Amino acid sequence: MSETVAFTIDLDGRRQIGLAEADATLLSLLRDGLEITGPKRGCNQGVCGACTVMIDGWPQRACLTLAAACEGKSVTTLEGYAEDPVMQRLARAFAEGGAVQCGFCTTGMLISARKLLEEEAKPDPDRIRQALSGNLCRCIGYRKIVEAVTAAAEGAET
Amino acid sequence: MQVDGSITIAAPRALVWQRLNDCAVMQACLPGCERAEETEPGCYRVVVAVKLGPIKARFNLVIEITESEAPERLACRTRGEEGSRASQLTAESEVRLQALSEAETEIVYYSEISLVGRLGKFGLGVMRKKADQLAAAFASNLQAQFTDQGVV
Amino acid sequence: MPAFVQRPTRLDEALALKAAQPDSLYLAGGATLVAMKNAGLIEPESLIALDGLQELSGITRLADGSIRIGAMTRHRETAASPLLTGSLAMLRQAAGKIANPPVRNMGTMGGSLANADPGADYPAALVAAEAELELMGPEGERRLPISELFLDWYETALKQDELITGIHLPTPSAAPSHYRKLARVSGDYATASCAMVLTADGGLRVAIGACGPAPLRAPAAEAALCGHLHDPKALAEFSQSLVDLADPIDDVRGSADYRRKLIPRLISASLDRLLQEQPR
């Protein structure tokens, strides 16, 4: 399947056209066709969560989504949250709280955490662990990550 | 992965031995076998197709008889790959024939199989179940070789 | 050349596309199919995506009180459905134990069933619920009891080009039900699982998952146990009848022997839980 196709997707609030192979995943289209590098290519099997992006408002795996199936859907990557105050608070809490070690899992973690804070303003640690259970951190930095999400949620009041 | 077991065939041992060494019989009995030819004495080229759910694979195998003690023991080495795809299979197998009576033979088989590449990623637990099923199908096909031809 | 991913909006269109392309596959949520494609395990010539078919979505209560789950309903929606109560609560619980939130936002009930992974969570829950599948194929629509779907390891009774369009469940009763899953870590496939519902006549329906190509169920043993739920000997005999039906695999999640040992423990733990919940 070497045939290259132009895909039109609603990406980060803009209609964008990218080139990829006809059977490409959304992850390939984003990273290789559109040079959006927030979503990472980890396992390519849907297990690690590093490629997690928002599709029609729900965190999903870019590596398990075909680019062609995204036409007409809205895709948001971390890049699309640049101006989002909740994401800015999360990113600051991750950086200040030592929740970023190698950083490979971080963008996926942030997407899942962003969805959680949309559903629940003040999640308890158990709820945070559940929401982030599809994002693996091989530096085993989970504790700091859970604390950072808690801190970002608490920071919303001030 | 180890695959072992035994099957009982209602036919005398000498006859079972003879059929086991007959390339045409093997092609007819081996489930999914599309082609089998003896390239030189004791050496066979075999094409076998297997299917597990949506996964389909076709192996080109070279089977070489390494030890043969008629009519009771056979050892062979199998090497092969999956067309242009990236799975390699190697196996060391041993087959023993025991006469249970004048008219019944037990075939005891043991195989150490190694599968690497794309199919190696698939769970070996289910592969072993599949191997057991193939052995059972082989047994009933082999039995039919004798029953259908009125040998027993 | 037809597009690699085709997105029909009508069921008859989907069937026609599938029939015209022998090496195509139906694409549901993609959570397993695309992973298999990425791993090089399958190489379909094209994919017929089912997400544009309205009749395959949503959970609805029908006029007679029974429930229909569209085959493309995501695990997230099933896990949160207010319609799955009492005797059907185990199905909601099973959906909530599949993988993790992003995968539950993708995966569908129909896709999971068609894939027929023995370690998946829905099969046991649907067998215990006595669900019926709504299928559509080139020869038209038909119904199939869930107990007849799983023929062998990863093999189903679906005919060529046939697809699951919906899952039908009997009207839920107030009888408590429970889905219990033993897995190495949260979100893994089950090492073994148990779906159980108490019945009004003092008995139970039980299905054991991940211990064979299909969920295990023993109707005769269920009948014998009826009225004797508090009798440890009767319960042990019942559990043994399910152990006898098991044909588990040896794999990284556990040996076949270990899985057999889990069956009685899952049953007694589930029953304890349900007897506590039962209205007195």
Image (spheres, coloured by chain):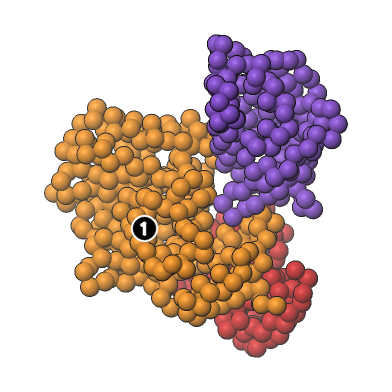
Q: In the displayed structure, would residue A66 be above or below residue C89?
A: below
**SS for dot 1:** strand
> Which chain is assigned orange?
C
Q: Is residue A136 visible?
A: no
Residue at 66% from the left image edge and 77% from the top image edge: C3
Quarter of the image for residue A124 reads: bottom left
In this rendered view, identify the residue nearer to me: A74 or C170: C170
Disc 1: which residue: C144
Residue at 31% from the left image edge and 44% from the top image edge: C206
Q: x and y percent of residue C104 in the render?
A: 49, 63
Q: x and y percent of residue B76 in the render?
A: 76, 26
* Quarter of the picture holding the N terminus of chain B: top right
Which of the chains bears the disc numbered 1?
A: C
Q: Is residue C268 visible?
A: yes
Of the chain colours in the picture, the one used for chain A is red
Q: Is residue B120 left or right of residue B62?
A: left
Residue at the extreme top of the image, as rendered? B101
In this rendered view, identify the residue nearer to me: B4 or C108: B4
Q: In the displayed structure, would residue A152 be above or below residue B42?
A: below
Of the chain colours in the picture, the one used for chain B is purple
